[in-house]
Structures are given as structure tokens and as C-alpha cells.
Amino acid sequence: MILQTLVALGPVIGLIALGYALRARSFLSPSFWPPAERLCYFVLLPALFISGTATADLAGLPIALMAPILAGPVVLTALGLVLAQRWLDLDGPAFTSVLQGSIRFNNYLGLSIALALFGPDGVALAAIANTVLVPLVNVLCTLAFARYGAERLTLAGTVRSIATNPLILGCVLGILLNVSGLGLPPGIAEFVRALGSASLPLGLLCVGAALDLRSIGRDPGAVVLATAVKFAVLPGLGIAGCLLLGLTGEPAATVILFLSLPTASSAYVMARALGGDARLMASTITLQTVAGVLYLPVVFLVIRALTG
């Protein structure tokens, strides 16, 4: 497992570093990156989810065990932060960034590592994790912006943002194609698979391009709080859930992996759009992504000890 983890993380780290270097050296126009991330988010990554789930053996996966172990820690963590908010020295917008930094996760990292570790099964397991976590995290973060953000959201706007999320739609469509027995017909299957295969390298390059190393020292107290919750509390609750409900093997490893991932670079976009503290969000994203290089191998030592 250790060697597998290092092999899995090598290309991930390399692509993130390359994206950072390309942006820092202005090898590509700065205007290239926002459309590239939009392409990944709205087209390529949903295609990967559709391809991975439409053909996977979902009947063999312990979805009924994975779902509560994934969702429970996220809900408990969010509720704990909301209850503690009155004692934290944070204004409303800053609190939304701490919350996003504590429960949001980087899809590209999770999928890349799961695929490298578990092969095709990793895509299916990661899709299950995303099917549970993406709607839940988006609901919780959107509600937090509605309550604490500088720009208050309406109920209709909240529902619309969740119902039109492309990652949710991709997961749901892939599962429907699977359980209905329709699958993906020849020709279309190869087309969707080709689109999906482009999502991870381009997505990881975008993650690297979004890093701002100069921002790490800003707002240290709030950044450390979000990082401590993300890297200790959330996976700790996931490990407890696996032990309590008896989830083991690759499904348990996937659950712990996704609960341990650094927060997503898209959290910065959401903070800017919905009235969060964008500067604090940028600091949190950068610190967690850089620290994740050292942190994720430790996570897999824990996973190996728990799952054998």
C-alpha cells in the first residue's frame, strides 16, 4: 500500500507542480485557466463519472455502509463549527471560508489517487463517494452562505445551484444507466470514456495553476483551524465510522481518502461569488494542497493499518 501510494501521488504531485510552473512562468495566457477549469467541471469530470458508474459492478459495492460513514462526519463537523461560531473570532464571510476549508474536498486529487490505487474499481468507488458528498457539501456550504455570507441567497437559488450541479448530474446519470441495465452503447461508451480520461490531467494542472504560495501566511489562525478540522477531525470521524460499522478493504480506504482530501480550488470561486472571504479561502486552499503532499502518505499508513 505504501509503494502504491507513492506511485499514485507521484504523477499527481508532478501535474500540480507543472500547472503551478506554467502559470508562474506565463507559458500560457492567464485567460487560459478559467475556461480550462470550467471545461473540466462541466464536461470532462461528469463524463468520467458517467463512464465509471455506468459500467461498474455497483451491486458488489457496500454503498449502504459507505453512504452514512461519508455523510455522518461531514454533517457532524459542519454542525460543530456552526455551534462554535459564536466563540470564534470570525465574521460571517470568514466563517464561510473556514467551513468550506473544513468540509469541501478536491475531486481531482481523490479520483487520481483512487484510480491509481484501485484501477477501474477506484473510479466506481470514487463516484459513490462523490454521489454522497457532492450534494451534501454543496447543500451545507450554500446554506452557510445564505446565513453568514455577505450576499444572502434565496431558497430558490439554493435549490437551483444544487439541482444543476454537473458533478451531481453526472453521478446520478451514470448510476441510472447502470441500474436500468442500459449502460453505454458502443461508440458512445468510447466517446464518454475519452472525455473522462482528459479530466484528471487537465484538472490537476488547473489545481496547480490556482495555487498562490504568497497567500499561505495570511490569516494564520483561521487557516490553521480549517486545516486542523479537515486533516484531523473529519478523517478521524470517518475512521471511527469504519470501525463502528465494520467497513473494510478498498471501500473503507476510499471513504477515509475522500474525507482526508485538501479542500477544492473551486471553493475560492464560490467564496468570491457568494460573499465569502476570498483571501482567507485562497490561503486555506494553498496551505492544504501543499501540506497534502506530506499528509496523504500518512493517511494511507493509517488506512493500511485499519484495512490490512
Image (tube, rainbow, N blue to C red):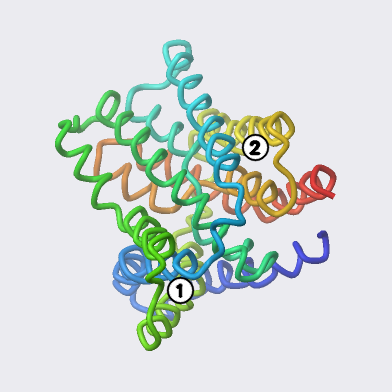
Residue 187 pos. (x, y %): 37, 88
Of residue 242 and residue 98, the one placed in the foreground of this image is 242
Q: Amino acid at mark 2?
A: Pro
Q: Residues within 10 Å of mark 2 (few under 14, many from 20)?
A: many
Q: Is residue 291 visible?
A: no
| Residue in view at x 43 percent, y 85 percent | 190
Q: Earlier in the sequence, mark 1 or mark 2?
A: 1
| Residue in view at x 49 percent, y 37 percent | 103
Residue 222 pos. (x, y %): 51, 30
Disc assigned to residue 24? none
Q: Is residue 16 visible?
A: yes
Secondary structure at badge 2 equals helix
Q: Residues within 10 Å of mark 1 (few under 14, many from 20)?
A: many
Location of residue 22 with respect to 273 vertically, above or below: below
Q: Amino acid at mark 1?
A: Leu
Tell me the quarter of the image containing the N terminus: bottom right
Q: Image quadrant of residue 18?
A: bottom right
Using residue 32 as the reference point, say whether residue 263 is left or right of it.
right
Between the C-alphas of marks 1 and 2, the distance is 27 Å
Q: Which residue is mark 2?
A: 235
Farthest residue to the front: give it.
181
| Residue in view at x 82 percent, y 50 percent | 304
Residue 288 pos. (x, y %): 58, 47
Q: Which residue is mark 1?
A: 202
Location of residue 232 with respect to 272 vertically, above or below: above
Q: Are marks 1 and 2 in contact (CB under 8 Å)?
A: no
